[in-house]
Image (cartoon, rainbow, N blue to C red):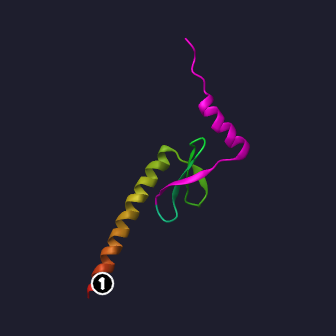
Amino acid sequence: MTKPTNKPTFIPKLYCNFFGHDYQVTKNVTYHVKEYTCSHCKKQLTTNSNGNLIELTPKFKEINAILERIHASRMERSKKKTIASSIY
């Protein structure tokens, strides 16, 4: 019985160590807060309150989910307000 190797995860990490990460936006939480994932090693980051990139921990996932819900409800209210004001 052979032991599975970690080669599939080792090569992307080696690539990122040598060339750097290739972050792509995976989720727009608000206009200023986004979630990023490295296309090679799948490392996830998000923007904090200062606008710096930090690792996406379960705590920040929860914060981003709440921010996204608040942002969506505000945008929905804003659209309704715009439609109501254009009728009058």
Task: State the image coordinates of residue 62 (x, y, percent, origin top left).
Answer: 43, 49
Residue 8: x percent and y percent?
Answer: 60, 31
Taking depth in this image into account, of 21 and 31 the one nearest to the observer is 21
- Where the N terminus falls, by quadrant? top right
Depicted 72 relative to depicted 7: above or below:
below
The residue located at (60%, 41%) in the rendering is 41
Please determine whether, in this image, residue 21 is positioned above or below residue 83.
above
The span shown in magenta is: 1-29
Magenta stretch contains residue 28 = yes
- Estimate how packed mark 1 is, as few (under 14), some (14 to 19) or many (20 or more) residues with alpha carbons within 10 Å: few
Q: Where the C terminus falls, by quadrant?
A: bottom left
Mark count: 1
Name the secondary structure under disc 1: helix
Please indicate whether residue 28 sits to the left or right of residue 72 in the image.
right
In the picture, measured across the screen, residue 50 lies left or right of residue 74, that is right
User: Is 12 placed above or below 45 here?
Assistant: above
Which quadrant of the view contains residue 7? top right
Residue sitting at 49 percent across and 65 percent down? 31
Residue 65 image point, x, y percent:
42, 53
Seen from the viewer's position, the closer of residues 27 and 64 is: 27
Instruction: Compare residues 15 and 80 and report the one nearer the observer.
Output: 15
Left-right relation of 36 to 18: left
Q: Is residue 81 left or right of residue 37?
A: left
Q: Which residue is mark 1?
A: 85
Residue at far top of view: 1
Q: Residue at x 60, y 54 (%)?
A: 53
Q: Does 81 lie within the magenta span?
A: no
Amino acid type, label 1: Ser
